[in-house]
Amino acid sequence: MYVGSYHWGFILLDDTGTEHDRIVFDRGDSVEIVAFNTSAETALEKLPSAVREAIPDHETLEERNEERIPPPPNGDFHDVLDEANENAPDHSLAVMPSERNMGHMGEGGMMLHPIPLPADATSTTTARLSASERGDYTPICHRDCGYGHEYMYLDGAFVVE
């Protein structure tokens, strides 16, 4: 599975480059996550072509933000995005129990401590997880990346059955 970070969200892609809102795993599955910052051009070159070609362009990602993030109180959405790209280009990826599943915190499950996803990365980052506890899990960014940072998560995007 491939997880790309961008201001202010994540994209989930499989090996064929198909984008998913949710990915379901069976309990006990070993999960390999290849994570990257969509601004890390050198790292993107190392992705399989099907995955690389499926990454939405900057304008499409900006439209997604406008659909799910409230407009900034001061200024234009495009301006705050440009500011974030310039001043806070890096992200991180962590996986935590979703809001519906917070009672499992600390009991295992499918957790990933934050891994850095810098915009100047020269390679992707691979993490291996075990889908050991049933429930919903959320990819989230733990690095302040500007105005939309608090919306940088995909609640329940990973499901362990």
Image (cartoon, grey):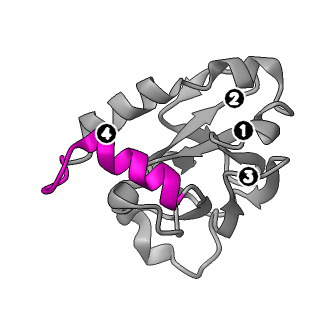
Extent of the magenta region: 71-88
* Distance from Cα at disc 4 to Cα at disc 2: 29 Å
Nearer the observer, 3 or 27: 3
Q: Amino acid type of disc 4?
A: His
The percent coordinates of residue 101 (x first, y second) are: 42, 65
Foreground tag (4 vs 2)? 4
Q: Earlier in the sequence, mark 1 or mark 4?
A: 1
According to the image, label 4 marks what residue?
Answer: 78
Q: Decide which of 104, 148 is in the foreground and name it.
A: 148
Disc 3 packing (10 Å; few <14; some 14–19; many ≥20): some
Amino acid at dot 2: Asp
Q: Which mark is residue 120?
A: 3
* 80 falls in the magenta region: yes
Query: Which residue type carries mark 1?
Result: Met
Residue holding disc 2: 14
Mark in front: 3 vs 1: 3
Label 3 to label 4, Cα distance in Å? 22 Å
Q: Is residue 61 above or below residue 147?
A: above
Q: Circle 1 is placed at which residue position?
A: 1
**Element assignment for label 3:** loop
Residue 90 - label: none
